[in-house]
Image (cartoon, rainbow, N blue to C red):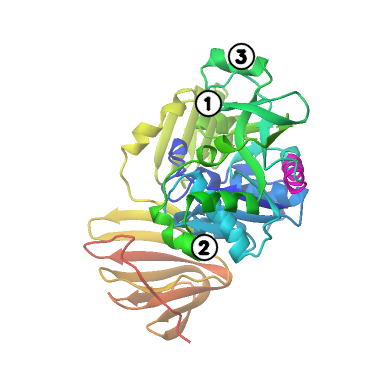
């Protein structure tokens, strides 16, 4: 089975854990099924993100499934950090809505990965909260598309209430697999109930098709020859959704009914409903708290007393204390907050900003075993590294030097440098010194031989 996960957005509704780099699908709040023992033999709980959970579930249902993530450049490092190099990645140069993104990943699968035009692919969001039966249904969806049941095969979610958040698919009958009669836009609650009474299903944005079908439609709307040509022209493409460009013009559509658990965890309120524990991190409650959830990524304890129906979230980006229902209205307030990104995952590890002054910034850097930063330089700042744990080596203007705990390395403006972690990983404190410290002040180079 070929499956494409659409991963986009900044997820500001889950501030302060999400930001412009760290979208909601990368926040680690779900307990992993397995645990591992620490040095004292006690078992530690480990957490996984939405994208890690979905990837694990796909491989549980179909260990041979080929997974490709369609995403933006800003998310690539985090995806590599959390999923490794086995997953394919189709990178959008810029945002152009779902039709161009799906055409790009379809072209990537055919021209770059060598997938046949007659092979089916399933496309779905990266962040639903579902059980394994959902992925069994995705496999069935792929089989229906592969067998030619219809040009386009959708998954319709059995509605549990008259939602105003989703569009509706109206099937021709109530069979498990049915041809589609019509589509309805997001309604008000009263109209939604009428759709449900008529057998309507939620449109969860999940569909399957053969590569040839979408590429043929793409060539009707876009002048391109292959993946490289499409990528080169991408910035100039019209912004249009897959529904408007494809679905509305297709008469041969089938829908597969899905009646299992399916949640869109787009707000703090819905996210806490899926949490297996009431707290992640160092959080203390007294016995008068009721229906309270908290996530703490700070290195200090949080004490909660006498609260009801509240969510608390603390990270280096900020602290949220909100009534659960009101947390759904967070976005305009977060949009008004302009702040340095304080935490990010990279393909080589992660960094966390510890302190910001007028002419300096202090960062804690963690490198995974055997990984390294890019070989790079800065034009507007000096840097000082102090190794606080682990071993490795630095390369500074071509000179290789082993480093261990307590070692200090200084890089002046314009100096090319990188650090490579040893087998146990490496942590260091990086002090940046300069009058104009920005993330854009970075020039990359090829690694010296």
Residue occupied by mark 1: 185
Q: Which residue is pictured at 42% across the width and 53% down the height?
A: 94
In three-dimensional space, the C-alpha distance between marks 3 and 1, rounded to whole angstroms, equals: 13 Å
Nearer the observer: mark 2 or 1; the answer is 2
Other-residue count near label 2 (Cα within 10 Å), few / some / many at <14 / 14–19 / ≥20: few
Q: Which residue is pictured at 46% across the width and 70% down the height?
A: 373
Residue occupied by mark 3: 194
Say which element carries label 3. helix
The percent coordinates of residue 106 (x first, y second) are: 59, 55
State yes or no: discs 2 and 1 in contact (Cβ < 8 Å). no
Report if residue 75 is visible in the image: yes
Residue occupied by mark 2: 225
The percent coordinates of residue 26 (x first, y second) are: 54, 48
- The segment highlighted magenta reads 136-147
Q: Which residue is pictured at 47% across the width and 61% down the height?
A: 231
Identify the mark nearer the N-term, 2 or 1: 1
């Amino acid at each position: 089975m070929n499956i494409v996960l659409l991963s986009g957005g900044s997820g500001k509704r889950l501030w302060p854990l999400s930001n412009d780099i760290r979208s909601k699908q990368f926040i680690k709040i779900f307990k992993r099924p397995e645990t591992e023992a620490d040095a004292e033999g006690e078992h530690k709980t480990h957490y996984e993100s939405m994208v890690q959970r979905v990837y694990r579930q796909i491989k549980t249902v179909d260990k041979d499934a080929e997974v490709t993530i369609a995403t933006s450049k800003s998310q690539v490092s985090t995806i590599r950090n959390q999923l490794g190099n086995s997953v394919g990645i189709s990178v959008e140069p810029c945002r152009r809505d779902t039709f161009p993104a799906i055409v790009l990943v379809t072209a990537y699968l055919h021209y770059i990965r060598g997938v046949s035009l007659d092979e089916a692919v399933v496309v779905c969001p990266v962040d639903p909260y579902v059980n394994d039966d959902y992925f069994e249904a995705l496999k069935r969806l792929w089989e229906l598309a592969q067998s030619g049941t219809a040009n386009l095969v959708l998954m319709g979610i059995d509605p549990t209430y008259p939602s105003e958040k989703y569009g509706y698919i109206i099937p021709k009958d109530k069979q498990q697999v049915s041809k589609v009669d019509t589509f309805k836009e997001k309604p008000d609650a009263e109209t939604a109930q009428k759709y449900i009474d008529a057998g309507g299903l939620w449109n969860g944005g999940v569909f399957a098709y053969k590569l040839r079908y979408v590429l043929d439609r793409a060539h009707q709307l876009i002048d391109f020859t292959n993946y490289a040509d499409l990528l080169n022209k991408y910035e100039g493409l019209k912004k249009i959704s897959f529904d408007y460009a494809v679905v509305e013009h297709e008469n041969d559509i089938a829908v597969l009914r899905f009646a299992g658990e399916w949640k869109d965890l787009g707000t703090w309120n819905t996210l806490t409903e899926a949490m297996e524990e009431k707290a992640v991190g160092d959080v203390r409650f007294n016995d008068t708290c009721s229906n309270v959830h908290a996530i703490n990524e700070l290195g200090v304890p949080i004490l909660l007393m006498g609260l009801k129906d509240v969510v608390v979230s603390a990270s280096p980006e900020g602290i949220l204390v909100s009534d659960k229902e009101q947390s759904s209205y967070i976005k305009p307030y977060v949009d008004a907050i302009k702040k340095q990104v304080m935490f990010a995952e990279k393909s080589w590890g992660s960094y966390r900003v510890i302190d910001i002054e007028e002419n300096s910034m202090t960062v804690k850097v963690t490198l995974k075993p055997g990984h390294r930063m890019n070989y790079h330089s800065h034009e507007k700042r000096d840097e000082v590294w102090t190794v606080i744990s682990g071993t490795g080596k630095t390369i500074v203007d071509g000179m290789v030097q082993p480093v261990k705990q307590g070692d200090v390395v200084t890089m002046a403006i314009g100096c090319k440098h990188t650090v490579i972690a040893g087998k146990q990983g490496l942590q260091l404190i990086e002090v940046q010194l300069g009058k104009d410290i920005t993330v854009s002040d970075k020039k990359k180079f090829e690694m010296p031989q």
